[in-house]
Amino acid sequence: MGAEAQKLFNEAQVALKKIIADKSVKATGIVGFYPANSVGDDIEVYEDETRSKVVAKFHGLRQQAEKDPEAKEPFLSLSDFIAPKETGIPDYVGLFACSAGFGSDELVKQFKAQNDDYNAIMVESLADRLAEAFAEKLHEIVRKDLWGYSAGEQLGTEDLIKIKYQGIRPAPGYPSQPDHTEKATMWKLANITEQTGISLTESFAMWPAASVSGLYFAHPQSSYFAVGKISKQQVEEYAVRKGEDFEKTQTWLQPILNYD
């Protein structure tokens, strides 16, 4: 909208075409699917289809903030979108990590060495957008082919933007699961660093920065939600489930605590 916005868009297109022509940025990613069932607010991941050995657990946080009783809305946790173990229904959970940041750091350094901050920021922005586009495309391939639960899906760009497809791809550290440390389970389960080169920092940020990761849920009623503020009681219970020290767990969940 407006002359300046159009000018920025045009310049971004030039930069993008040069990146493509020079092959100066590399994209890489991984997708995995695992037998899984929920146990309370946790998701158990099994070694194989016998479902006899648990190889990983994803821990969920449940909404606690007051809701309008007239609306009869459930208090959600991500585990709600996986079949409970006691039902005997074999279910699955997926995960992914993808990046369009390999090579972008080098480009940014080149521009900064030339005191060209504008193009340095442009490259960073384009890498971020490419990573998000990669995640969107991967999810489409998962829905229509790899998992195949929406094989006949035919959606336009607007429908994709409005998330009219079945299934979600929530990421640790975001509203549906605000705990960044859950990424460690993903990375270990799928050997993500070894397979892709995408690594985690001590604060569980992804490197390269232009990276996206998350879990895949296929349930027809799965939806994004915000856990919101949680009580000390849930933090204590969550720490026990994770097998962690309470103080450590509380520190990671600081932004969503409903107490001082």
Image (tube, rainbow, N blue to C red):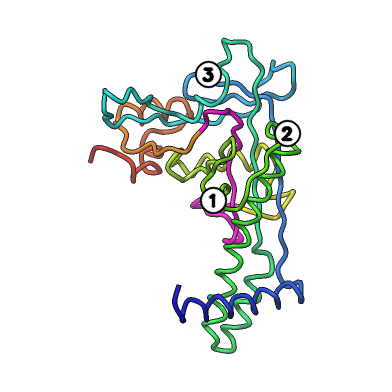
* Circle 2 crowding by C-alpha within 10 Å: few under 14, some 14–19, many from 20: some
What's the residue at 48%, 19% (across, down)?
A: 40
Mark 3 is on which residue type? Answer: Val
Location of mark 3 (residue): 39
Quadrant where the C terminus sits is top left
Q: Relative to residue 136, is residue 73 drawn left or right?
A: left
In the image, residue 5 sits, relative to residue 252, either above or below, namely below
From this viewpoint, which residue is outermost toward the left? 260
Q: Is residue 217 magenta?
A: yes
Q: Nearer the viewer, mark 3 or mark 2?
A: 2
Whole-percent x and y of residue 186? 61, 40
Sequence-wise, the earlier of marks 1 and 2 is 2
Query: What is the CA distance from the residue labelled 3 to the residue labelled 1?
Result: 32 Å
* Callout 3 secondary element: strand
Question: What residue is pinned by disc 2?
Answer: 148
Question: CA gap, disc 3 to disc 2?
Answer: 25 Å
Q: Which residues are magenta?
A: 200-222
Q: Residue furthest bottom?
A: 114
Comes first in the chain, label 3 or label 2: 3
Give the CA distance from mark 1 to mark 2. 20 Å
In the depicted structure, whether residue 93 falls above or below residue 187? above
Three-letter amino acid code at disc 1?
Answer: Ile
Q: Residue at x 58, y 28 (%)?
A: 219
- Report x, y in % for residue 5: 48, 76
Q: In the image, 72: left or right of 193?
A: left
Residue under the image location 58 percent in, 62 percent down: 129
> Quadrant of the image for the N terminus?
bottom left
Say which element carries label 2. Answer: loop
